[in-house]
Structure formats: C-alpha cells, structure tokens
Amino acid sequence: MKLYQRGDVWYVTHWTGEKQIKMSTGCTDRAEAERKATALLAPVITQTDDEIRVATAVAICDKLARERKKTIAEQLRLVDCWDRYPHTSSKKQLSESTLRNARMAWDNFVGYCLAKNIMTIEDVIPAVAKGFLTSCKPQWKVTCYIYCRAMFTRIGLMANPFDGLRPESPRPTHREPLTIEQIHSLLGVADRLAGQKNSAPDAPEFATYIRFLLYTGLRMGDAAKSCISQVDHESGTI
C-alpha cells in the first residue's frame, strides 16, 4: 500500500499480482487517509490472501497426487497391467480378434521388457518403447504401437512413453494379375507334378488347390480351410 497526494486529497495505490488498484481516500489529512486506505483495501487484501491460500492448497494437492502416482508406478508390475487395466470400450463391444491382438501386442512388449530386466511401469521410458517398436516386424509395428500406447493411457500414472513414436504403416505391395499364359504355365506344372510317380502323395490335391485359388480369388489360408458344406451348388456360391 502506498499513499500519494494530488492537490489536497490523498490517494492510495496497491498491487495485487500484476494488477494495480488506485483509490481516492477523500481525505486531506495524511493520518486520516492512512486509516481510510486500510479500510478501503481490506476486502482486496483479504481476497488476495484467499487466492494465495487456494493456489497453495492446489499446488500441494498436485504434488501429493504426483508422488502417489510415482509410488504406484514404482510398484506396478508390467505382468499385472493387463488384468488391472482391461482393454475395454464404452462405445462398443470389442471383438475377440481385437482383444486377441491387443493381448498379443502387450504380451510381446512385456516379454521384451522382462528380457531387459525392466519389471515395473516406472522403469519404462521412451527409449524402451522405441527399442521395442524397432524390434517388431514391419507389419506388426503399428498394431503394437496402438495397443501398447492405449494401455499406458488407461494406466495414466506417467507420461505415455509411446507418445510421438507412431511408426509408418508398411507400404502395400502391388501385384499385377496373372496373364492367361502365366495361368496355363502354372497349371501345367501342377498337373505334371500330379502325374509323376515320384511326386508327393498330395500332388494331385495341390493341383486342385491351385485351381481353387485361381477360380475363387480366396486367400491361401481361407481356401485351405474351406469345407464342402460351405458350397451352395444351386446358387453357385461359397
């Protein structure tokens, strides 16, 4: 609080943080002006003190919360995270394949960490996450990044070590369709092997399998698992 005079009247000025307050005491006597200034500034000073106390309390709570999270992170084992922080979605029911991929990605990460004697969440730093992604196969990197980052987001005890590490998606390989000449050549080889006496016992079945692939366009695994019961002869569909 500071008093200054303009003409015969005394004024008071006071700083609250970066804000300056100026008031007229309406008094021409300095002693009386000091008493009046104290009364005028009392609400402002009280409010400032309250704000300081609130800010201090908030800072203390934040500090205690950070210390608590750090303590939990120091004790939370990587192998326990899947059960303690399940991979769920409030918007929709996750498919079995999604949960299976998420579990596989997390198990791979846990195995990588355990091999390096990293046991708890607190020990996982961005360098560890980056090293894990580097060790993944190209087609598996993005999946591991998505699910492992989601796990650390759900845990929420520390800065996410996977943030900013999203790898580039592998570029798809473009393959031109086979020409008629290539198809005839492929089937010719398959039929020749099927007719040879020294060929494998399943060579004739392989020749049929090749034709099934060419005719349906199915992936190799789907074609191999197809059953006769899946064929609708009347509609000509599988």
Image (cartoon, rainbow, N blue to C red):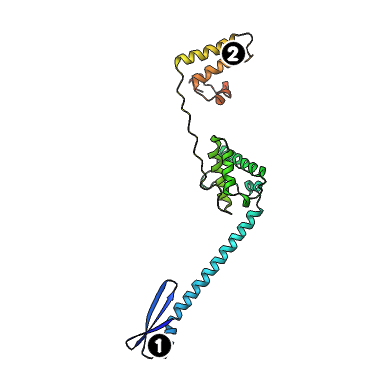
Residue bearing mark 1: 33
Rendered image: mark on residue 215: none
Kindly identify the amino acid type of the residue bearing the numbered disc 1: Ala
**Which secondary structure, mark 2?**
helix
Residue 174 screen position, x and y as percent? 46, 27
- Relative height, residue 52 to residue 221 (above, below): below
- Closer to viewer: mark 1 or mark 2: 1
Mark 1 or mark 2, earlier in chain: 1
Residue 193 screen position, x and y as percent? 58, 11
- The answer to whether marks 1 and 2 mark residues whose Cβ atoms lie closer than 8 Å is no
For the point 37% across and 81% down, which residue is it? Answer: 23
Kindly identify the amino acid type of the residue bearing the numbered disc 2: Pro
Q: Is residue 172 left or right of residue 137?
A: left
Task: Count neighbours of disc 2 (C-alpha within 10 A) and say few if under 14, some if 14 to 19, many if 20 or more.
Answer: some
For the point 48% across and 15% down, which residue is it? Answer: 183
**Which secondary structure, mark 1?**
helix
For the point 45% across and 79% down, which residue is it? Answer: 43
Residue bearing mark 2: 204
- Relative height, residue 27 to residue 197 (above, below): below
Q: Is residue 93 visible?
A: no
Residue 84 screen position, x and y as percent? 63, 49
For the point 65% across and 50% down, which residue is it? Answer: 120
